[in-house]
Image: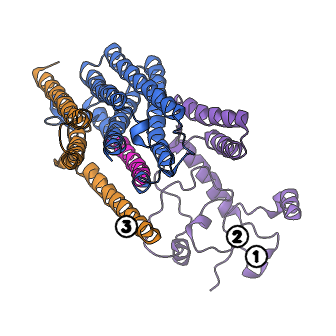
Amino acid sequence: MNADHEMERRQELRGYSIGLVLAVLLSALPFAGVMLGLFPRAALIWIIAIAALCQVVVHFRFFLHIDLSSSHRDDLQLILFSLLIVALMVGGTLWVLGNAHAMMG
Amino acid sequence: MAQSVQGKGPSHIGIRLSNSAPASHREEARTQAEEALFGFWIFLMSDLIIFSMLFVTYATMGHSLAGGPGPHELFDLSSAAWETVALLASSFTCGLATLAMRYDRSLAKTLLWFAITLFLGLVFLSLELHDFMTMASKGGVPSRSGWLSASWALIATHGLHVTSGCIWMLIMFVQAAKFGLDPLVQTRFMRLALFWHFLDIIWIGIFSIVYLLGVLS
Amino acid sequence: MIIQLWVSIRQREALSVSAGDPWNGRTLEWSVAAPPSEYNFALIPQIDCVDAFHESKKHRDAWRAPEHYFDIELPSNTPVGFVCCVASGVFGFALTWHIWWAVLLGAVVFFGAIILRSFNRTTSHIIPAAEVRKTEERWLLTLRETGFIENEAMFTTANNGLVREPV
């Protein structure tokens, strides 16, 4: 195997390692926060939500290799479109059922 | 120079499949692999929609305890933490397996990393099974309340996915032993890796929304 | 329906329309032999109007032999779809009525069929150009030997699949 090849390999390995470290940190923070009661409750909710979102992005970027470069444009567009559909369905469900809940309560 | 065909920089997962084949064949294999992977992405996104609907069902059922046991009594956060560790580590070893397959072209190394991934997957599953049995023994069975139905459905659907990932891995071991690391086996391993990473992402949602926010509320 | 099947099987020789165009059809499915060959079209037809077959008959250039024949790759026959269909039907029925042995059986057969299928490496086969040429030329010969019939004879056994274009 030539040097180019070896470099690419190392680059990818570094990507996976960075991904792992970030993911561990982003999981440990909310778990520790809740289990040890480090922060007030309102702050914890925000920490959990933001850490989860960040970790999803980390997974996509470092494990699934989805980024903004043109070779992944198709995959990215598919994912964004699916997210739009998910947002519509989730938002709509919460809205409708929230209303129903409020009216029955 | 053979490597120049391989594209620049870290490219799409699974694009660089075959180093020994002539350039034209490699080009063709790459296009086929890309198509297969894109098709698999479409499947994953449909799966994502299933999971989001389960999540949103869970969210709407958040307060429907019907007098039954709630997250405080039923959830064991340290168990969820260990499950997270097992699944995260397995995602990493799964990545290493694909690296071993694509760069080292070593069947033994590839299978070793996938075997470690499988082991971690089984650790995750046994922890989850233990969780389920603890929940049931405390009266937290799915038929008890709307909240329990929703959480069992969500967590068990993810668990079933991990189970099928494990079975898939076992089948791929047989195929790899039978056919070697030929392009078809390689793209299948690549799709398996995508599936596995995807399940990890779903798990982030589960431990954040179901376990952590559940215990907080 | 049984009578219809009975008649059409018993008198299949007399009723056959091997030239393939018994109703003076307008669309491309009538432009091939009856029964059609496994690959349907020797060349994928290029279409630039509605009712392409009708237009080509009007301009007297229907049933042209292609200049070149090519290898055609086709998916091979497989029982997997049928097996999965039956097994998943059994699976669903048994789940509904709590027949646990049938649940297990359906699941094992369903997933087993898919898993076995994944070990099959030859899921398609190639019909060589020479064989396509032979089949097509045999049919074109039949076509030339078949006499045109008039519109009025369409519903008689004289119809062998070639109807004269009304002027």
Specify the colour of chain A: orange
Residue B181 visible in the picture: no
What residue is pinned by disc 1? C154
> Residue at the location (64% across, 56% down)?
C36
- Across and down, in percent, residue A23 comes to 22, 34
Point out which mark residue A95 bears: 3
Dot 2 amino acid type: Pro
Dot 3 amino acid type: Trp
Q: Which chain is blue?
A: B
Question: CA–CA distance between discs 2 and 1?
Answer: 7 Å
Point out which mark residue C22 bears: 2
Quarter-wise, where is residue C154 in the image?
Answer: bottom right
> Would residue B48 be counted in the magenta stretch?
yes
Rate crowding at label 3 as few (under 14), some (14 to 19) or many (20 or more) other CA atoms within 10 Å: few
SS at circle 3: helix
What residue range appears in magenta?
Answer: B34-56
SS at circle 2: loop
Rate crowding at label 2 as few (under 14), some (14 to 19) or many (20 or more) other CA atoms within 10 Å: many
- Across and down, in percent, residue B9 comes to 13, 35
Please give left or right for residue B25 compared with residue B149 in the image.
left
Specify the colour of chain C: purple
Q: Which comes before the other along the chain, label 2 or label 1?
A: 2
> Residue at the location (29% across, 29% down)?
B88
Question: CA–CA distance between discs 2 and 3?
Answer: 59 Å
SS at circle 1: helix
Look at the image and tell me in which quarter the N terminus of chain C lies. Answer: bottom right
